[in-house]
Each structure stands twice: as structure tokens, then as C-alpha cells.
Image (cartoon, coloured by chain):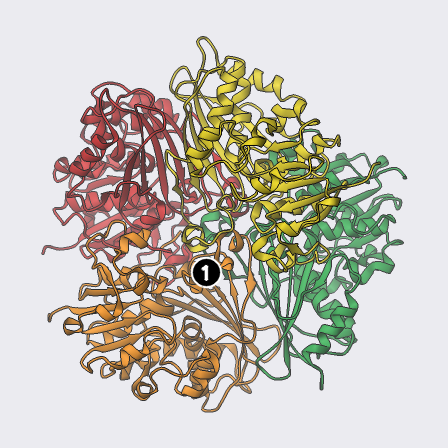
Chain colours: A red, B yellow, C green, D orange
Amino acid sequence: MSAKIRIAVLGASGYTGADLVRLAITHPMVEIAALAANQKAGQTMADIWPSFAAYRDLPRLIRADAIDWRGIDAVFGCLPHAASAELLSTLNARIRIIDLSADFRLNDPEIYGEWYGVTHPAPGLLAEAVYGLTEMARPRLPAARLVACPGCYPTAALLALLPVAEAGLIGPANITINALSGVSGAGRGLKETSLFAEVSEAVAPYAVGRHRHMPEIEQELGKGFGAPVTISFTPHLLPMNRGELETITVELAEGRTVGDLRQCYAARYAGEPFVHLLPEGVAPATRMVRGSNHMVLNVFADRVPGRAIIIAAIDNLVKGSSGQAIQNMNLMFGLPETMGLEAAPLFP
Amino acid sequence: MSAKIRIAVLGASGYTGADLVRLAITHPMVEIAALAANQKAGQTMADIWPSFAAYRDLPRLIRADAIDWRGIDAVFGCLPHAASAELLSTLNARIRIIDLSADFRLNDPEIYGEWYGVTHPAPGLLAEAVYGLTEMARPRLPAARLVACPGCYPTAALLALLPVAEAGLIGPANITINALSGVSGAGRGLKETSLFAEVSEAVAPYAVGRHRHMPEIEQELGKGFGAPVTISFTPHLLPMNRGELETITVELAEGRTVGDLRQCYAARYAGEPFVHLLPEGVAPATRMVRGSNHMVLNVFADRVPGRAIIIAAIDNLVKGSSGQAIQNMNLMFGLPETMGLEAAPLFP
Amino acid sequence: MSAKIRIAVLGASGYTGADLVRLAITHPMVEIAALAANQKAGQTMADIWPSFAAYRDLPRLIRADAIDWRGIDAVFGCLPHAASAELLSTLNARIRIIDLSADFRLNDPEIYGEWYGVTHPAPGLLAEAVYGLTEMARPRLPAARLVACPGCYPTAALLALLPVAEAGLIGPANITINALSGVSGAGRGLKETSLFAEVSEAVAPYAVGRHRHMPEIEQELGKGFGAPVTISFTPHLLPMNRGELETITVELAEGRTVGDLRQCYAARYAGEPFVHLLPEGVAPATRMVRGSNHMVLNVFADRVPGRAIIIAAIDNLVKGSSGQAIQNMNLMFGLPETMGLEAAPLFP
Amino acid sequence: MSAKIRIAVLGASGYTGADLVRLAITHPMVEIAALAANQKAGQTMADIWPSFAAYRDLPRLIRADAIDWRGIDAVFGCLPHAASAELLSTLNARIRIIDLSADFRLNDPEIYGEWYGVTHPAPGLLAEAVYGLTEMARPRLPAARLVACPGCYPTAALLALLPVAEAGLIGPANITINALSGVSGAGRGLKETSLFAEVSEAVAPYAVGRHRHMPEIEQELGKGFGAPVTISFTPHLLPMNRGELETITVELAEGRTVGDLRQCYAARYAGEPFVHLLPEGVAPATRMVRGSNHMVLNVFADRVPGRAIIIAAIDNLVKGSSGQAIQNMNLMFGLPETMGLEAAPLFP
């Protein structure tokens, strides 16, 4: 086999960056060449992360502008939106970019500006960006230079909806997504609403009617339907670290049944290593996927005639973020898709 | 002041029964005369409940058939469905019944049989049973002999939906309720799915498309609309002890807005001691009501035009169960409605 | 009945202050006259606390220096150490002070300076300060002008150790206290180590060998022994909101047994409304006291001959802080000791 | 490389067995040949474990007496004490046994009988059993036929105490171990005290003064000291799934310091892949090791002169159980010690 892929990680001080490093440590074909975190430059990963206490050989954190790009094959962008796009736009074209921020997910910089409140920092890169929902983007990944990894909510929503939308089994009206997420989704920033004593023993919705993952879901789902679609989406923060579950009610296309949806999923995901249709009647649960790159999926008849309830669960930090990024990297570099992602879920 | 109300509690070994006893202990006009729990007869509350370790003067648990009914003014039924209806049907008419089971909630014994899988154990009592959603049932409570307290999910759903349904502000189609509940809602029974290590750090839906609270919501909501209604309802079990949050998407009636709904709630709940419309934009959260009899409520514009998102939060064991039962008792016996229910939420 | 006690609360934006307000709301003889929180001045309690969402009539937060002291009968200091002592030292002698900070707990300002790193801000008040461990300080409270409420850890430790130390049943050597606390003990300050995702599913000790509650325990315990004592004390932060449990190993005095300790506790705490010796063999647990002012206590034989294991549990925010403060206020103002503190523990 | 090791797992329906299967799935030199669980025979792992929902190719569960031993190289015993010893004693001597129960840990069947309440089921095997605390047992493992894996509490306690006991740096008197464990340590059995709503937001000690891991710690520690030792040990159950932290107070040998202990650990564990002395002042935390085979360790000065506080953290199911079992298997079969155990801790 060829030499290892030398990676740089921008934003190694956030939960997403840390989970990427966690996975990279045991990936047999990855060498962690540079870890950047401007605010924490000079410290070690063990200094800022309890979980790397036993990993004192990792590269010390540096500022992003101190990275020596000459030896880097791929860069993972794990920064908030608009924070890395400018830097990424100046990189040598040889370096492949796997971005986990929102910057290259939306095709239209106008819509980006509208939802993120800033002028797009690198609109010139949008044309070549591949939307990295792995199971859908697979053919385009080997040649991709820049991959925009989907948001965690869109990952579960689109893997649940796209097959049945594309097959004409559901209609675009009245798609209602209720999403439940662990608190790691809110990041490591210091906010009162992320404190243990506020979150524990409690649940609350947030960003009702205005979450930034909505235009992303609508953009990709619209492609699946071949027509624009408007969705209802309400996310909730739960007292758990990881995990994401989406309960989606849809209208069946005329004459279609829940059985048709099952068949569609069964066919579409038969060979997939990470997407699993559960046996009839088994409800997806986040404990089925904790710490792993798997997604579990099922569909149920709604009590309202002509509707169905589709439920999907992922680990928001793995399949919803760092795991899918590694999965994309594997395909971009011609490696087996599952390499470094084989760990079974951690339970209990 | 008159003499205290002497109460008996059937099912003091379950979470609902225990929470009722917790509230009754400090209610200035209640005397706990008898505590029944057939499987635990002979033990003390302190033996079977950690939280009563400091309350060694409570009556010892006895079998329900050992209760001396002569001194009892009111009985609280905290047993599973079909377990107490027969006994209750034989009581002297002087004794007032506040039942927290499902037995007297559904008007039609056929529907009861269909959803609960048993022949109704006391159909003769159904005609006089008052559906005890306190804020709606208030005028009928002083004269009521038998009050059927609503299920926890229906309590939040109906307080959220009835005012706007009755006012013609929303339509009966496409009402989708996503409900999130703490694990105490599953009871103290020994089930693998209730073990800490299975529930913690996890979320899952259950009873998808077939939860027994659906016919109850539909029955009462149908009265509000003046026509039958079919709802979509998906409950989820969350890693928390108490608390219940419902996120409900509805269709606005022609020409109606979210502002109209706000006005309706503001007017309807202006004087209510326990139901609170939050300021515009503030999302309800279970931490706002933990351990209290309060419900918080708000309404938001949906991204899908012509729809709204209504969100309500209660403590499933208090307003959703024992607290509402006490609230009903207060009204049945002519006491101030808030007596014994004044405790502010416990946070953090 | 006489007029209500009009109270001011300094530091209503912290967990301790908020829990004091929670209790004060339902105290029949308390009127909340002023709530101060400099950083949050101008906001309402409902703005900054989810649990007061339904309590919109509370006084708006003001700066401490804006309090109109003329109508105030008692002030509760719920600020960090050294933040309020200066202000308190200027108050009219008519106003009684119940301080929950560390400022007036240590008799010696030198020791205070050593442990808290600042010169004592009001050494002139130390002489009149009563150490408000209620069960021990009871006779001195009616006449006290300034009461220094104990820290949460000292409260449990001293109620567990003082009776048997004073009775000569245990020796002063080798007293080892392992303390476990919910995260609310760390306050509402924004720290990475207080974030949900860091604390959940995890436990860690902190301030090993140097926690500031040590000199306080040693000071009071030394009085009990009649000689200086040095203790070992290791606190741990647990993934729970409230609750504190201390497991204390001690050496029995020559010829003494665990039975002697039981007898001593039984006699000492026989009439106490809030301190409860559990039946033989029953282990104290924080779930026995959650949200209440109770403490539960028990003693066990150690496997090492001649030693015993004493275990005590409290709610750190109630008996360990705000509840004990109210208990002290009741005695200072001649009210029944349990007034406003009758709520039974919240479980589950 | 040679053929894979074909393993059988007895007790695949418990948390320990499941975690062993989790690790075995990705171990490159292990083939899972048989999974036994008498009560669940006929079901799949996916039927009984949410975390294996995506692993439908695992062998179906069978009864232990239905295992075809001809193709088995090693058997992992993950059953409660006394449940498998008899069966294991009849196996062909070619099959190597890694037992995770308590059956072969205590050298003396009398002591076993005393603590476990049963006559030892296979005393004939005790002589050849190697106590599998890997870091101490390493030289004896390649030739071992039967390895008794230590209990979770002894694993952390002994790795923390043995080096400094053997070096004469601490004395055998007054060793006090306070142990904190996640609930998975209580197993998957249906007990009220393991229910989510009882455990969450709560902590309690259990088996005070009589936990079965005490004689095991004393046996091995006595070897380290070269003389019998009696310890104080109090375990507590915490509201978390995994993780174990032990806070141990010890007396320093005459003239010895905490610095001497640090040096000893640094030397002893310098090359260890899984045991890590933290930098001075850094407190061990279970979040440092979650889901991994690592142990973190540190030592602090006690406030009581002449004493030290040693703190160690492991994942009770991995290093405390299944991970150490795999580590032992690797050494027994001549594989690299870390094979299959490389996963970094899962955080958050």
C-alpha cells in the first residue's frame, strides 16, 4: 500500500475536531501532521481534552497560519462557518479539502448570506464543492478536490427522505421533521444553556422555525423531488452527550403504502456498510449507534391515513460529522470506505 | 375551617401514587388515612421509597380490600387500567373518586376495549365520570362524584390545542404531535428498557402509531372542533426522570396567523394559576416546571406557510398526573384551587 | 400574626440565590422586597431563570447599591466570598444578616486570608458572627444579628461528626472524608468543566488536598474534640444537579463500638425535624433528600477493626445552603423552625 | 500470520459479555465462533442488544451445553460466579480459558465459600489459575491455560497500590479506598435500584463494609506487602453508564514523600501502553478513559501529614473487565498486547 495520508485539522479544540482526531488516531492510513486551534496554540491535545490524556505524542496545537502545508495531503476544516473558507481558498490545489463547516454546503451564496448573516467568504470555490452525503455522493468523491460534509441534521434527514422522494413514493407537502440532539451538537463554547445543571433532567426546543440546517435540507431534498420543497423542522436539545434522532412525518404518494417505503429502503441500502433498515416494527434508538458511523432507519404507518412516520438515528459527532468526513476521505483517496470506522457502537 | 379531607390512595407503590403522597403530606387540608398497595402490603412507605426515609409516620401499606372505608372522604386511584374500576364501583356514593387510571377517560367502552384489550370493568360509572382536565372541567367539578384525570400526554396536548380549536383558529387536519417524556412515565415496573444503563445517553420513540393516549386526545379534541379528528402522535422516552414536552404542528384556519393564536391563549389563560403563555419567542422547556403543577406554552410560525408550531411543557407526574388530581380534589371539595400546589419548580 | 419579614437577597443570579428565592416564594411569613444581582440588574428573574417563568411578579433585579434598606428586615448574602462583606458591614444594625458566603465562617481572619487569598473585608464583624449550623447553633440564633451559614460540605460533615466527637466516641486521628457533590455546587459560572458534555457520564475529584471547606470543618470539629484536628477531605463532582453524600471513615475511641455511635445519634437527633438516623443497615442516598431540607445519616462497621464508616446525605442547595439559611431565619425571628421548609423530597 | 483465534463467549447476554463481543468484532485475529446465553438461546445479539442492531451476521445465541467445542481455541467466561466453573472444568485442556467471573480469583476455596456463599464449584482448577492483572501477570500469561481476570475494583486498586506497596513506600495500615462506579457494574439484571428514575440525579453507597471485591484486593495486596493486610473499601453507585474512579488514602512509609510515589509510578509504568501517570496536579477523571482500555493515575499530598491520596480511573467494562480479558488473550496467544484495544476514549 502507498504512503499514509498526511492530514491537517483546523479547529482541533472543538468537539468535532476532537472526534476527528479520535478516529484519525486509529486509522491505519492516516498520519496526523498538524493540529490547529488559534486560541489554544501552544498547548497539547492532552492539555485541553481529557480524552487525550493518554496520547501525549500528538502534534502540539499551532495557529492555522503556522501550518507547513508542504507535507499535507488533506485538510479537515472543523471550524465555525466563515472562519476557514478564506484560508482554504488559498491552498495549493494539490491539497484536498474536507470541510465540516456550513461554508460550502449551500450552492447559492445569496441564501448562505441570508441564513448565516455574512457575505460568503469564498464564493469562487462553490462550483467545485461536492456535497458530501457519502451514500449519495459516492461516484463524485474520487475526483473531488473540495467536499462539503453535510450538517448533522441534514445527514439523517436526507438519508431518510431522499430514496423515497426520488422514487416518487412520498409527496413534498407537509414534511415535518422533529429532531432530537445530544448537547455536543451545541459545541464546546461557554454558554449558560450548555451547563450541566441547566441541561440535565430537562429538554427544550431551540431555533424554532429558523434553524440553519433548513435551507440545506430543502436544497438537497428539492433535488430529490425535482422541485422546490419547504419543510417544517424543529430541533430539541436533550440531556445526553451524543446522538441524534429524527422523527419525520410524510404524506404518501397516491396509492403508496408503508410497505412500498420499506421495499425502497431495503433495495437502496442493501449493500451499505453504515445505513441499516431495521426489522419491521423495531424503533430506531440512538443507543444503537453511539460512537459509531452507523445510521439506523425504519418506517411506520401513521394513524392519519395516507401518511407515514420515518425515523432515523445517528451519532451526531460521527456519521453526522467526523465519521462521515473520514468516510469521504477514504473514497477520495481510493481507500476502503469503512477503513478506520469499524468500531462497533459503545453500549451501555 | 372545616375538618380535613381524609384520603385513601390506591397504588401507593407506583411513581404516580408516591408523587400524590408527596403532595398530600404538605397539603394543609388533607389527612392521609389509608395507603394501599397489594404487592407491598405490610411494608412502610419508607421501606419502598427512598424519598420517604424521613417520613416514618405515614400509614403502613395495606391491601386495597383491607381499607376501612368508613372514615374515607376521597379515594385516589393510582393503579394501572382495569385494576381498580371494579372496587371503585362498589364504594358508598358518599366517597368521591379521583381516578388517575385510563378507566374512566374514554366515553365509549367499545373504544376502551379496543385500545386496552379488556372489557371495561365498570361501564356503569362512565356516564357520571367527569373528564378532569381542570382548566376545562372547572364548572363541573364541585358536583362531580367521579373524576377521571387525563393522561399526561393528553393534558399538555389538550391545554395547548383546545382553546385554538374551539375558537376556530386551527383546522383539524394534519395535527402532528411529537411528545418527549421522562422515564418516570414508564412506571416503576422492572423492564430492561427502563434500566439506567439502557436509557442514559439515549433517546428512542416507542409505541409509534399506537399509543393509548391517542383516542383520548382525539375524543376531547373532537369535542373542541365539533367534529371527529384523527391525529398523528409519536412519543419518545428521554434520559430524564420527569418532564414532558410536546411539539405540535397545526394548520392555521384560513386567514389566521400565529398572532391570533397568541391572543387567544393570552385571553383564555390570563387568570390561570398554572397555565402560562410565555413571552413571544421564548421556547417552553421542562426545566421551567420541574416538580411543579405549572404548564408553560408558546406558539411559533412554522417555515411552512399557513402552519404554526405550538409547544407545551409540564411535569408529567405533577400537572400530568398527581398535581392535577389534587387540583381537581381542591375544586371538588370547595378549597382554593392552588392549595398544596404552590411549590415553585425545582431548578437546577 | 405579626407582619411578614421583608427580605433582600444579594446574588439572586446564582444557584444559591435562586434556590433561596424558590423557598421564599412559598414561605408564609416572608415578603421578597429586593433582589440584587449587579451583572443582571434591570432584568427579571424570569429572564434569567427558567424556573421562574411562571413567576412574573417577583421584584426586578437591581444593583446591590440600589437597594432601599429602609423597608428591609433581613438580608441574605448569596455572593461569592469577599463580594458582600463590605456592604454588609455598613448596614443599619436593625437589619439582620444571614450570610451564605464564606466570609464569616472562619473565626480567624488570618486563616481566611490564607485560604481565600484576600485580606478579610470586614474583620470587625467576625466577633458577633454566629456559625449557623442550625442544630448546633439553635440557642444562639434568636439573638444573633449576623449568622454565617456553613458551607455545604461542612454542614453534612459536622452534623455527622460533632455528636460522636463531643461524646468522646471517636478519636481525632485519621478522619477521612470522601465527598460527592452535584454540579450545582460549582455554581452558574461559565467554565468548561461545568458543561454538560464534560460532566455527563463522568466523575472526577477536584481541589484534592486543598479545598476551602477544610479549615472550616477543622475549626468546628476542633471545638467538638476540644483540640485541634487535621482532616483528610477529597471532594468529587458527579453528573447530577443536586445532592451531596459524604462517606467518612473514623477511628473509634478505645472500647467503643458502632452500636455506641448509633445510640449517640439516636439520642442527639431524636427530636430533630430535619436530621434522620436511618434504620440499621440502610445506606443514605441523595435521592432520599432531593429538593428538601432533610439530612439522612447512618453508621456502619468498617472491615478494619476499630473503625467505623459514617455516611450522610443532603441536598447541597437546600440543607447545604438556602434551606439552612431559611431555617436559621425562622429561629432568628421566632418562627417555627420548619416553616417554609416542609416540602417532601422530589423523587424520582 | 497464523489462523484466527476462534472464541466462545459464555454469558453474551450480560454487559460484560456484550462489551467483549464489541471488542472482538474488530479484533483482527479473533473469530467469534460461539455465543452462549442459556436464557436467550435462539435469539440473535441484535434481538437483545440495541448496539448490535447493525451486526446481523453474528452467531445466534445458543445454550452453553450446545457449543461445539471442537473448533474453539479460547473461551471467555462472562457469567456470574459459580455458573460456569463446573463446565469449564470439563473442557479439553487444549482450550484456553479466560474467566471474568470471581471463581478463580481467590486462591483459597474456603475464603471463596465465605464471601460467595457457595462451595467452590471447581477447586481442582485453582492451582493452575493465573490472576490476570495483566501488567503484573505478564510473564505467566503465555503459558497460562486458565486466567482469572480481576474484578473491576481490584484492577484499579491493585494497579494503584501494588507498585508502591512492593517498593515499601507505603504502609499496610489505614488503607482506605472509596470507589465510584457507573451503573453497568450492577449488571443487566432487573432490579428496582438499577432503574433509570432511581439512579439518575442520585448517588448512594452499597455493600458498605462487605463488598466481595475486598478479599480479592487483600489477597493480592498482601502479596505485594509480603504480609496480610486489611483494607477499608466503600463502593458507590453513580448516575453514569461506565467508568470507575477510586480515591485511596494511604500512609507513607517513614521518611517517604509523595514525590517518591510519583517516581515509583513513573518508573514502573513508563513503557505501559494502558497505564498512565498523569502530570503533577492533574486529577484523574473517568472521562479520560471512557470506552478504552486505559487507566489514568495520580498521587497527591494529603492534608494529614504523612499520608497520600492516590487516585485511579478506568472504564469498568473495558480495563475493568472485557478489555483486560482481551489484553490477556493477546499475551496468551503471542499477539501484540494492544491488538484490538487501540480505540481512543470516546468523549464527550
Q: Quadrant of the C terminus of chain B?
A: top right
In the image, is residue C4 above or below residue C292?
above
* Res C58 seen here: no
Whether residue A266 sits left or right of residue B205 in the image: it is left
Indicate the chain on which mark 1 is placed.
Answer: D
Give the residue displayed 37% in from the left and 76% down from the top.
D82
* Res A8 seen here: yes
Return the residue nearer the eye: A305 or D128: A305
Identify the residue position indicated by label 1 in the image: D183
Residue type beneath disc 1:
Val
Quarter of the image for residue B234 reads top left
In the image, is residue A147 above or below residue C132?
above
Q: Position of residue A106 (x, y in %)?
A: 28, 27
Q: Residues within 10 Å of mark 1 (few under 14, many from 20)?
A: many
Return the residue nearer the eye: B15 or C202: B15
Q: Position of residue B8 (x, y in %)?
A: 68, 45
In the image, is residue A282 above or below residue D174?
above
Give the residue displayed 48% in from the left and 60% down from the top.
D191
Q: Position of residue D117 (x, y in %)?
A: 46, 79
Return the residue nearer the eye: D71 or C222: D71
Direction top: furthest residue = B255
